[in-house]
Amino acid sequence: MKITAIVLFIVMYVLMIAFPKRRAITALSTAVLFLVITLLPIGDMPILELSDIPRVVNWNVIMMITGTMIIVDFFIESKMPNVIAESLLRVAPNILWVTVLMSVFSGIISAFIDNVATVLMVAPVAMVICKKLNVKPVGMIICIAVSSNLQGAATLVGDTTSIMLAGAANMNFADFFVMHGKAGMFFATELGAFFTIPIMIMMFRKEKAPVTSGERTKINDFFPTVMMISYVLALIIASFIPGTPDNINGYICLTGAAVTIIGELIFRKNTAGIKHSIKSLDIDMVLLLIGLFCVIGGITNVGVIGDLASLIAKAGGSNKFLLYTIVVWGSVLISAFIDNIPYVATMLPILGTVATTLGVEPYFLYFGLLVGATLGGNLTPIGASANIAGVGMLRKEGYEVSFGDFMKIGIPFTLTAVMTGYLFIWFVWA
């Protein structure tokens, strides 16, 4: 069964590369094949059962995407992104610096709220800017997505993997900044983000067309902006409250969407806006994520993730530097194709045991894992949920993004950020 699952997984990725417009169908079809094969009287273990689906699908992400898309649609219709875009155009000298500023802005936000929510909030502003300047938005949106994915590792509340690390290493919010008298993950991540700025400047060096904006858009509805700010604050506050439900972020986003809809009905009698927001839901993106979660759940069930984790740990042997190097760069390669949440969950206890065997503190291995696993998803358009959200938004606007298009930005961005974090963690912690 393990070999069957691996072969189908590889075929799925090949088909998604070959047929980018059919990614959701490909992922869901692979998940269905996993279910069908499990029902057949062959093999020694089930790949994926119907009862596994509620467990393997990250419903928190699904609910966050759904709720945020509704709020963002009202936000876009209110014309607030136009106002923000016009303000940015009055500050930035050219398209190059618009791209850099938008990426830095998204990264800062992503350090405190979920990466997907960040992309869904910031990307509409970028879309408006690109329409005003009559330029293709592909490069700018990809930069926003990878920047969001990068800086999610900066704080305890920025990404699920950070929360998992905090639980395994008994870390609090402040430990991500300074721990045991040493600089923590925040500085490793931010230093990596800083060095990606020259990379963006080099990639977009030809985009020197000057930008100006003499327009003054009038906002026709402030309520969606109030709701947008409120739900961001709610996400931040919830992250500091112990004992909250696992899917609290998803509940907050769905609640925010419901309150936004009700508010529009009460204050503006706006039924047209509700119909528009429902029609704007990117069902294809949601289905793609569900399919991928099921497929990753299947290969996890048959032990592929565990095998990869053990292989990485064994490959390093007793050489501390070799082990650390394999953990970081092996995690980059794996996370480019496999969701990093089950992978990190599997690796954390393994690395703790390995560190005890070597007689060293495990933190440099833990932080190296987070650097590799979080940033590795930036290599491909389906390596992280934030990337899927950004590519999905581009597709809705009529821009199909191939693996090659994405990786032209993702590869240099990832290599720069990972190398910076890799060296920083080793010299500070090892």
Image (cartoon, rainbow, N blue to C red):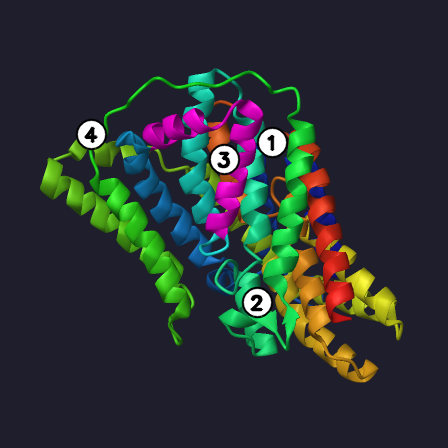
In the drawing, does residue 247 fall left or right of residue 39?
left
In this figure, which residue is indicated by the disc labeled 1?
Answer: 20
- How packed mark 4 is, by other alpha carbons closer than 10 Å (few <14, some 14-19, many 20 or more), is few
Q: Hey, what amino acid is under mark 3?
A: Gly
Write down the quadrant of residue 397 in the picture: top left
Cα gap from disc 4 to disc 2, whole angstroms: 41 Å
SS assignment at label 3: helix
- Of discs 4 and 1, which sits in the foreground? 4
* Circles 3 and 2: CB atoms closer than 8 Å: no
Cα gap from disc 1 to disc 3, whole angstroms: 11 Å
SS assignment at label 4: loop
Write down the quadrant of residue 379 in the picture: top right
Q: Position of residue 172 (x, y in %)?
A: 51, 74
In this figure, which residue is indicated by the disc labeled 3?
Answer: 392
Among numbered discs 1 and 3, the one appearing first in the sequence:
1
Q: Name the main secondary structure of what is drawn in magenta.
A: helix
* Circles 4 and 2: CB atoms closer than 8 Å: no
Q: Is residue 100 above or below residue 236?
A: above
Write down the quadrant of residue 330 in the picture: bottom right
In this figure, which residue is indicated by the disc labeled 2?
Answer: 176
Among numbered discs 4 and 1, the one appearing first in the sequence:
1
Residue range corresponding to the magenta coloring: 81-110
* Circles 3 and 4: CB atoms closer than 8 Å: no
* Residue 289 shows in this picture: yes
* Residue 380 shows in this picture: no
SS assignment at label 1: helix
Q: Nearer the viewer, residue 270 or 182?
A: 182
Q: Position of residue 183 (x, y in %)?
A: 64, 67
Q: Hey, what amino acid is under mark 4?
A: Asn
- Of discs 4 and 2, which sits in the foreground? 2
Q: Which mark is residue 108?
A: none
